[in-house]
Image (cartoon, helix red, strand yellow):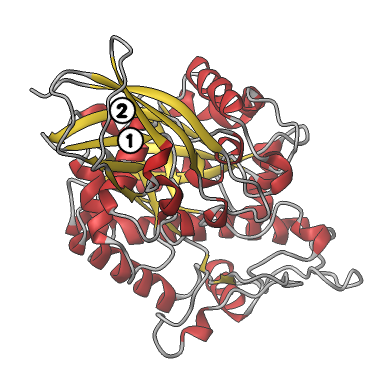
Amino acid sequence: MREEAWLGPSIQIDPTFAYYRDRSADSVARELKQAGYRSVRYFVTREDRVDGRLVEALKRHGLFVWAMTLGNGTYATDHLPAGWERWRMELLKPPKDDYTRLSPHSEGYLDWKRRALVRLVEEHPFDGLEIAEAYFPEWNGLSTGVYGDVGPLAQAAFRAYSGMLPPEFVHRTSPAYYKKDRGRYLVWVEFRVRAVNRFLDRIVNGPGGVREARPELRIATWSIAIDAGRDPARAIRELQGIDAAEMIAAVRPDLHMLQTHWPDWTRQRLPADYARRYRPFVEPLRRQYPKLPLALQTDIGSLRSMRRSAAWMQRFAAAAASLGYASWTAYEYSIGGWMYEEPPRALAAARLASGAVRIDFNKRLDGASAEQTEHYRFRSLQGEPVLLPDLRAAADGQSVTLYSEHFPDAAFAAHIRGVRDTPDRWLASGCPANVSDCRIVVPALS
């Protein structure tokens, strides 16, 4: 694999999504490879449940595979050890969602996460590791109450760090209220930045850490960027404990990713070149770390109202390149607007044997539809019909393998009309299927 494969176009995938289930790992890998990606960021939602066959298939098809995990919590808790509840992050006003926030101040959580990630990269041949979203909540947390950690773990750690009690965030009459006692509050801000970077540094670089287990592994760090206010980098540092320059100094990554914050990616009419507004985050990093590659992450369809089209993605990629990013990625491959808008289209045809032809499409196909042989018509390159009375079809994800003992040895054309895609496997429900009407040339039998 070329060394540069870890840079360039990249995509995030969550293999727990229905789009990736009930198909071969090779079909997933071919689809992503044919879409033009050079690396894949495998979203590890549970450290104990990784599809090793998929990781191996992605690598076999020449893709660089990152293991991407979250730093500040988990969507599932049944794989955590007894007593994990003591690791919880406490917020002023917890949101009602299905995400369990865990505190970087917890030595138990830090040690467990380090061991879990070491085991992950020892058991599976990932090429790189990144811990996203190690930050504290939340962008507007002091006004909404979605702000933390303010629980016993944070209080004890702050006393050990500063010798002071933490600021008061609820009772405005208190002398320690954060808007009154600014000195205490500024120490609190520094303490939170240090906590995030210490958490990441110990997992990656500490004794028994990831680099000790797999020194050849590429490491990427993640911070967040936003187009908001006069000094957004200072606001992110204050509200969420993220200082990208200090994080890079602590972890010493091979790549740093700027993640688009939710107030930006949720915008329905987000311009594809919106990252031009991220200069307050980018320029200091380029001054301090001129040789460190930077990457940009976006979201392409987590909400129905903001699904990004293929044309938008092309403009986004062009803008990222023009702004000097070495790589870009998007969450999540299967939720982009093109999944809902574009029909199945044949991209490649290959002879597997004299009686077998595989056709790869741009997206997953409905298996029952793809295996109906009346959806396929064949002609010679001179336009004469090619009759295949024994034709059979077997679908696998985005590919269909056609079988017949009567395929001509010469190249011929296949017209595929009526094959549907898979609305039942998309993130947004209730969307109509798209139907193929495409043509591809099957090469001559060599």
Check if mark 1's residue and mark 2's residue have beta carbons within 8 Å.
Answer: yes
Left or right of residue 256, residue 95 in this image: right
Task: Determine the residue positioned at 68% across, 49% down.
Answer: 303
Of the residues shown, which amino acid type is indicated by label 1?
Asp
User: Helix, strand or loop at disc 1?
Assistant: strand
Of the residues shown, which amino acid type is indicated by label 2?
Ala
Task: Determine the residue positioned at 45% across, 30% down.
Answer: 345
**What residue is shown with label 2?**
348
Question: Within 10 angstroms of label 1, few (less than 14), some, or many (20 or more) residues?
Answer: many
Task: Name the residue at the left extreme.
Answer: 446
66 relative to 310, above or below: below
Q: Quadrant of the N terminus?
A: top left
Disc sitting over residue 257 in the figure: none
**What residue is shown with label 1?**
360
C-alpha gap between disc 1 and disc 2: 5 Å
On the image, the x and y values in percent for residue 241 come to 59, 53
Q: Nearer the viewer, residue 22 or 116?
A: 22
User: Helix, strand or loop at disc 2?
Assistant: strand
Instruction: Name the image quarter holding residue 99.
Output: bottom right
Q: Nearer the viewer, residue 241 or 165?
A: 241
On the image, the x and y values in percent for residue 94 come to 72, 72
Instruction: Name the image quarter holding residue 199.
Output: bottom left
The answer to whether residue 36 is visible is: no
